[in-house]
């Protein structure tokens, strides 16, 4: 068998394609499942109750989503390179089935590249496109995994026989080993250089990550600053009030000093961002369930947490019943022994176990019992 | 040259493919419905351009460039240095891709008051990563060359 030499023919064999394809199938599935999970906990449908335990679950699933997505980049590019000569197969369609199979490659490859690129850009807060990242990334993932199912259907048999070495390889195994070893090394390099944004002990190695879990006001990162959210706290918080309203027996209103004088509870909980960084901190504040009891709200109510932030998708969030019952769901006044920095939500922020970072509402001014 | 693959049957278009086509087709249709249903956020036209554009940029730009670089390396670098040289170039390219948005400071430019976004000096950081990559591949190359020489010596003895 001969190939034009410019395609570096010795690498374009089916076993290499099969092994890389299997790697892609696994990494893409991990990204899809963890991505769906993130979507589910961020926008829970009526039938779904976000579990508050284990407290670090979202940190793990989202850290895995981003780390797997980054690790997928070299595998995806290597796989596309290995199968590149097939683009020029002639005749292009030998049968209707081949035509359909090849047509599905368009959303598969375009979608895979788009998901990798848009995800990498998003973790870097870079948006070189007109659409909403979350929606475009989410729906493109459905289209791409649909195309992947079609592709796996066509390639299942051949991939299995090549992985199991039931067919003789096309070319020298030394070259293949060197190539696959190179891809594995590339995966290792980009993983080690980024995963420290969520795996604390490796943070010093996170040279290519857009975040360091120990860099930011009070020693951890900020997603949205007070200035970006257009939040100002007048008179250093002297006129600040927290109100508890809605379906309550008696409406309550507190100054920050009154809250500070209450029975405070401490919890060590992570802030886990959808963009893949996370950091644990020691939070101290008032238990939400204590405030609800004082207001005479029904046990296990849902509560809307309202921020001083006047606009934006995350100016309020909802605590579901299992979350309001959890003793670690706090309205925090302090972090790591200091009053909150305004970029971390001074005068008061929500912090609860296993909530995505964007739902840990900052600058809280109201609890509305639903 | 036929299909360029030695005439080997490399796809299965039997029952498994047809079932996968039905399921995968339904999932794709759901995704396309979602894009169109949420058109205000997804901008279907430009999303289409980005997805198809990704295909085209890969097939018409990235892959040919990789082929040319690979061919040049084959021409310029003799074995046993060739595989380590290829590895160094490939891993470096991937590291540059992953580090590119940080290196360019795109996120920081968008939120200049947020010092926790892209907090490092990324030219130093990326330089360090590349230095480690080239050092690692140099060690690998040296091991390869030494091993090959000792094999040749053993063969000559």
Image: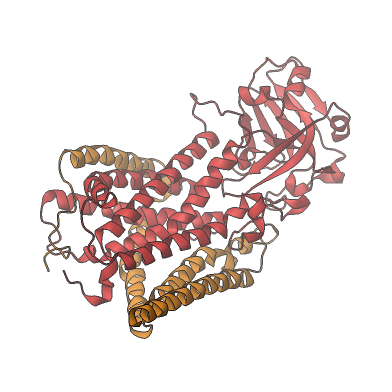
Chain colours: A red, B orange
- Pick the quarter of the image with the N terminus of chain B: bottom left
- The residue drawn where x is 21% and y is 75% is A4
- List x then y, in percent, for residue B127: 59, 73
**Residue nearest the observer in this picture, A267 or A5:** A5
Q: Is residue A355 visible?
A: yes
The C terminus of chain B - image quarter: bottom left
Residue A42 image position (x, y, % from top left): 54, 37
Query: In the rendered view, would you say B79 is above or below A215?
Result: below
Q: Residue furthest bottom?
A: B76
- For the point 70% across and 59% down, the residue is B115
- Residue B26 occupies which quadrant of the picture? top left
Task: Give residue B86's position: percent from left, percent from top.
Answer: 40, 73
Of residues B29 and B59, the one drawn nearer to the viewer in this rendering: B59
Q: Is residue B100 above or below residue B20?
A: below
* Residue A351 locus on image (x, y percent): 70, 36
Comparing A361 with A334, the one in front is A334
Above or below for A339 versus B1: above
Q: Is residue B45 left or right of residue A5?
A: right
Among the 4 quarters of the image, the one containing residue B85: bottom left
Between A249 and A3, which is closer to the camera in this rendering? Answer: A3
């Amino acid at each position: 068998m001969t190939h034009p030499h410019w395609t570096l023919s010795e690498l374009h064999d089916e076993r290499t394609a099969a092994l890389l394809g299997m790697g892609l199938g696994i990494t893409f599935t991990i990204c899809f499942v963890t991505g769906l999970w993130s979507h589910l906990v961020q926008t829970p449908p009526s039938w779904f109750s976000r579990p508050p335990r284990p407290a670090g679950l979202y940190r793990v699933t989202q850290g895995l989503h981003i780390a797997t997505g980054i690790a997928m980049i070299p595998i995806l590019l290597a796989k596309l390179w290995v199968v590149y000569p097939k683009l020029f197969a002639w005749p292009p369609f030998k049968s209707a089935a081949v035509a359909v199979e090849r047509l599905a490659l368009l959303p598969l490859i375009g979608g895979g590249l788009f998901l990798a690129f848009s995800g990498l850009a998003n973790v870097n807060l870079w948006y070189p496109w007109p659409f909403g990242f979350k929606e475009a990334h989410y729906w493109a993932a459905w289209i791409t995994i649909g195309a992947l199912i079609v592709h796996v259907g066509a390639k299942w048999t051949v991939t299995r026989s090549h992985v199991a070495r039931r067919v003789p390889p096309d070319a020298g195994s030394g070259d293949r080993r060197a190539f696959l070893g190179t891809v594995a090394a590339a995966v290792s390099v980009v993983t080690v250089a980024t995963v420290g944004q969520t795996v604390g002990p490796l943070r010093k190695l996170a040279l290519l990550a857009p975040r360091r879990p120990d860099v930011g006001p009070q020693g951890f990162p900020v997603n949205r600053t007070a200035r970006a959210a257009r939040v100002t706290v007048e008179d250093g918080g002297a006129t600040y009030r927290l109100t508890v309203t809605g379906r309550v027996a008696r409406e309550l209103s507190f100054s920050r000093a009154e809250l500070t004088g209450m029975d405070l509870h401490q919890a060590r909980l992570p802030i886990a961002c959808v963009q893949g960084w996370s950091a644990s901190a020691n939070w101290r504040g008032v238990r939400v369930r204590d405030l609800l009891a004082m207001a005479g709200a029904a046990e296990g109510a849902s509560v809307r947490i309202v921020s001083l932030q006047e606009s934006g998708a995350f100016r309020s969030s909802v605590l579901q019943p299992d979350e309001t019952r959890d003793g670690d769901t706090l309205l925090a006044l302090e972090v790591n022994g200091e009053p909150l920095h305004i970029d971390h939500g001074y005068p008061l922020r929500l912090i609860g176990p296993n909530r995505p970072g964007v739902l840990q509402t900052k600058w809280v001014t109201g609890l509305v019992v639903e | 040259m036929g299909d360029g693959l030695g005439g080997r049957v490399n796809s299965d278009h039997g029952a498994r493919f047809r079932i996968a086509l039905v399921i995968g087709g339904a999932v794709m249709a759901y995704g396309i419905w979602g894009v169109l249903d949420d058109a205000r956020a997804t901008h279907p036209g430009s999303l289409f351009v980005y997805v198809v554009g990704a295909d085209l940029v890969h097939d018409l730009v990235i892959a040919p460039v990789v082929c040319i670089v690979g061919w040049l390396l084959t021409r310029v670098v003799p074995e046993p240095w060739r595989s380590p040289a290829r590895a160094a170039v490939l891993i470096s390219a991937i590291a540059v891709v992953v580090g590119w948005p940080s290196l360019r400071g795109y996120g920081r430019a968008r939120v200049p008051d947020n010092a926790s976004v892209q907090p490092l000096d990324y030219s130093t950081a990326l330089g360090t990563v590349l230095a480690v990559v080239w050092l690692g591949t140099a060690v690998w190359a040296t091991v390869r060359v030494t091993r090959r020489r000792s094999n040749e010596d053993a063969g000559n003895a």
